[in-house]
Amino acid sequence: MTRPYNFSAGPAMLPEAVMQTIQSELLDWHNGMSVMEMSHRSDAFIAIAENSEKTLRELMAIPDNYAVLFMQGGATGQFASVPMNLLRGKNKADYVVTGIWSKKAAAEAKQYCEAKVVADGSEGGFTKIPEFSSWNLNNDAAYLHYVPNETVNGLEFSWTPEVNVPLVADMSSCILSQEYDVSKFGLIYAGAQKNLGPSGLAVVIVRKDLLGGALKDTPSILNYKNFADSGSVYNTPPTFSWYVCNLVFEWVKAQGGVAKVAEINKQKSELLYNAIDGSNFYSSPVNKADRSRMNIPFLLADDSLDKKFLEQAAQRNLQQLGGHRSVGGMRASIYNAMPLEGVQALVSFMQDFAKENG
């Protein structure tokens, strides 16, 4: 059976080579036991855990003064964990709101501090990133939080904000898709289910000097220092998700690393955007300079054809192309695991559909 091209925003498709390894090791991970059956404190699983951190550090050039944590709760869990851990005696934090996920993060933080929205793209329908010169920054903030790539709205920062406070980034949908200078950030976090592996896990990369100042009422399971001190096995972690992430890290390394993957991602996104821009039948709602390479929303000229488009796409083995329920239209998420051939197949279908219905 031919596997479909899955354009879901998450949980997203995994590299086929990784899936095949999972299949071959499901009942026996080199020791007669499945990873799902192993103790998280066994030598076998600790070896997996240590290799995953080592490989991720290599892929992202993570400096030694940063801790790498594997936590539960996905990125949404980090919406609370970030202020709980990083306020460190302050009561103010700055948030840049450029889409649904940064808006949710700011709303969650307001339960713990004065979360000030210093830039807000909602007035324009989250179709453009506000100019940096317009940001109303607070130099007394504990940190500045932003989302480099908005999964739902399809906006991506092509630059890294330079601020005088620790920079916090939710990289759930762009981690490992291109190179980032980790040293410019105080903390990076990412839900695994887009570019790293299955759902259930969040990766946190945090500068070590930011550890140890959690709010008094912070649950122990959300305290970064507890995870840093325990090698992320403070409690029983989602071991299978962690194991798959380790395989994905190795797969990225085998592709030639993040720089090589970024080249392919650029090629894929340009192919799809050129198809959209070169047609009167499709359009992109996002400002060209702020377009995402990972999540590409687009509209049909006649939205009454949306249902037909999705049905016929599915018949061509192109799945999960419907836009988020809050914005409608279409959305193609083309994370690292989406091969170039998948985008080529989508573009071919879009051209055929436009000819038949335009």
Image (cartoon, grey):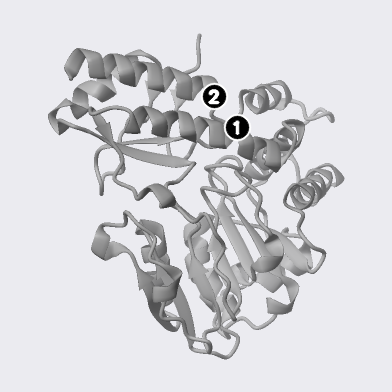
Q: Is residue 211 visible?
A: no
**Residue 148, placed above or below residue 55:** below
Q: Secondary structure at mark 2?
A: helix
At which x and y percent is residue 289? 42, 51
- Residues tagged 1 and 2 counted as in contact (Cβ below 8 A): yes
Residue under the image location 33 percent in, 13 percent down: 315
**Residue 232, placed above or below residue 45:** below
Q: Please state which amino acid type lies under the numbered disc 2.
A: Leu
Mark 1 or 2 closer to N-term? Answer: 1
Badge number at residue 340: 2
Q: Please state which amino acid type lies under the numbered disc 1.
A: Ile
Q: Is 73 left, or right, of 97 in this rendering?
A: right
Q: Nearer the viewer, residue 316 or 88?
A: 316
**Residue 101, placed above or below residue 134:** above
Q: For the residue carrying disc 2, how many other residues have a C-alpha within 10 Å: few (<14), some (14-19), or many (20+)?
A: some
Q: Secondary structure at mark 1?
A: helix
